[in-house]
Amino acid sequence: MMSKQSLAADIIDGAIAGAIATWIMGKATTALYEGENQSARQEEDQARHGKTAYGVAAEKAASLAGLELSDEQRKKAGQAIHWALGIGAGALFGALRPRSEIASAAGGLLFGAAFWLLMDETVTPALGLTPGPTAFPWQTHARGLAGHLVFGTVANTTLATIQPAA
């Protein structure tokens, strides 16, 4: 399986797919969160101390630069980090998809699941952006996995539409 276009073009296509997938993933995870029972939502919010992992990342980055963020600045910077990560993941997927059959296995579901396991369950707590996985109810993990499966599927479908067939 080899791309009919350059690596740079595949990365750009992937970034576009990542942006679309990030947007749709956000809609899906918001709907799932709103449908969760109140006790699971409270348990998750308490574990996060009312902050998202992206907001905590923004605070840590600002602190390294000697800055302090207001709540509004933290939220905006956190959203920027969220979008950058999604677009970056899409760019990586765009580069890998035409070059590796495993990257697009199961219509992007494998990529989405791997991204969830790596980022949500491993890197984010390792960097101190969230407490460890046991601090959260199962619903948090299920929603995160579902969201990343949506991400992988949407990114794969978008790329199947915009990238030339191998």
Image: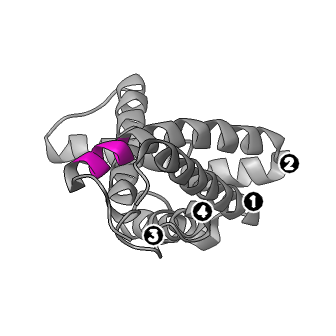
Give the labeled residue for mark 2: 37
Determine the CA span between mark 4 and mark 3: 9 Å
Give the percent coordinates (x, y) of residue 155: 51, 49
**Vertical comparison of 150 with 65: above or below:** below
Q: For the residue marked with disc 3, what is the amino acid?
A: Ala
Marks 2 and 1: in contact by CB < 8 Å?
A: yes
Determine the CA span between mark 1 and mark 2: 9 Å
Give the labeled residue for mark 4: 107
**Exactly how many numbered labels are in the figure?**
4
- Would residue 51 be seen by someone viewing this image from the given angle? no
Name the image quarter holding residue 92.
bottom left
**Vertical comparison of 68 with 84: above or below:** above
Q: For the residue marked with disc 1, what is the amino acid?
A: Gln
Task: Name the quadrant of the N terminus.
Answer: bottom left
Q: Mark 4 or mark 2, which has the lower sequence index?
A: 2
Looking at this rendering, what residue extends furthest in the top direction?
Answer: 72
Residue under the image location 13 percent in, 41 percent down: 65
Give the percent coordinates (x, y) of residue 88: 33, 50
Identify which residue, 99 or 112, lies in the foreground: 99
Q: Which residues are magenta?
A: 9-15
Is 80 placed left or right of 28 in the picture? left
Marker disc for residue 103: 3
Give the percent coordinates (x, y) of residue 106: 62, 69
